[in-house]
Image (spheres, rainbow, N blue to C red):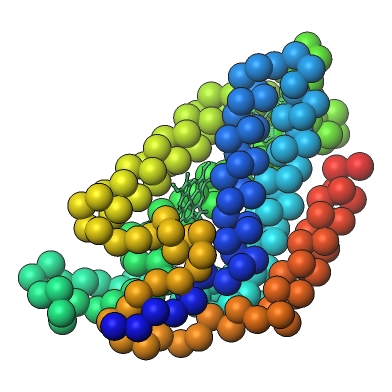
Amino acid sequence: MTEQRIWDLPLRVFHWSLALSVILAVITARTGGNAMEWHMRLGYAVLTLLFWRLAWGFVGGHWSRFAAWPLWARVRRSASAESRPEFPGHSPRGAWASAGLLVLVGLQALTGLVADDEIATAGPWAAGVDAQWSALATNYHHGLGQWLVLGMIALHLLALSYYTWVRREALVAAMVHGRKVLRRAAPDSGDGAKLRALGLLLGLCSLAMVLLLVS
Ligand code: HEM
Ligand code: HEM
């Protein structure tokens, strides 16, 4: 057994910032009224985080890269615990769930940009697109989209409860401190000062890009 840092600090900061922003975006949308101004700001925060994650999937720590996601790996059910392959980062199902979460949250934020409630709140691009497209995006954002995001989050939490209480894997703690106990040594995540500085720089670039896009 060996303990290793798997999730780099920037990825962990990304994860908890995304979770908080999405939850607050849902609460402010439900509150309505003046809270909608904050809803849009939180939506911009979500977009910034997603742009950042897209880049981090190519230049981030070893286990944050999309190349390390075992999307197509097959695990034989009959394999014993000892002979079963070990996935230091996401498991194949975890990788699919992560991709699903990122895509659905992304769709929600993008449709928000052209959504218009025709009363008081409109996304910054609503006036610039065809009314038909805006109505379609609003319907998705307001209806199916929000339920897909909430459903996926519920599934995420259910799966994590199963891994925590039934399989006794400390996945949640690993998303906090980054470390996992492994059967075999795995490639290093590369989580050092240089990588963290790159994460910060990319964060500032993503924020600048979003501000430019929505101003
Ligand atoms: C992941 C991020 C987001 C989530 C989870 C989210 C969620 C929601 C939800 C649940 C509603 C419906 C509220 C209701 O029941 O009436 C809503 C409405 C709205 N959102 Fe978002 N939103 C997000 C991002 C954005 C962004 C980036 C913008 C634009 C900058 C935006 C603009 C709007 C507008 C204009 C409405 C009013 C549309 C309507 O209800 O008819 N949202 N949002
Ligand atoms: C609104 C809520 C949430 C959203 C949108 C969300 C989103 C995500 C995403 C996108 C990933 C993939 C990380 C990556 O980019 O590689 C992930 C992984 C993870 N999340 Fe969340 N998350 C949310 C809430 C939570 C909560 C409340 C917890 C803990 C109780 C949690 C624990 C984890 C863990 C442990 C992983 C890693 C799973 C693995 O090892 O494969 N998440 N989450």
Quarter of the displayed picture in which ligand 1 can be seen: top right
192 versus 146 height, above or below: below
Q: Is residue 66 visible?
A: no
Along the line of sight, which residue is nearer the eye, 8 or 102? 8
Q: Is residue 183 visible?
A: yes
What residue is drawn where x is 78% and y is 11%?
Answer: 119
Quarter assignment of residue 134? top right
Image location of residue 164, percent across then percent down: 30, 53
What residue is drawn where x is 73% and y is 52%?
Answer: 48
What residue is drawn where x is 22% and y is 58%?
Answer: 167
Quarter assignment of residue 36? top right
Quarter the C terminus occupies: top right
What residue is drawn where x is 78% and y is 36%?
Answer: 41
Quarter the N terminus occupies: bottom left
37 versus 77 height, above or below: above
Along the line of sight, which residue is nearer the eye, 22 or 117? 22
Image location of residue 204, percent across then percent down: 82, 61
- Is 92 on the left-hand or right-hand side of 50? left
Image location of residue 18, percent across then percent down: 61, 48
How many labels were placed on the picture? 0
13 versus 5 height, above or below: above
Along the line of sight, which residue is nearer the eye, 145 or 172? 172
- Is 161 on the left-hand or right-hand side of 56? left
Q: Residue furthest top?
A: 119
- Is 53 on the left-hand or right-hand side of 104? right
Image location of residue 58, percent across then percent down: 62, 75
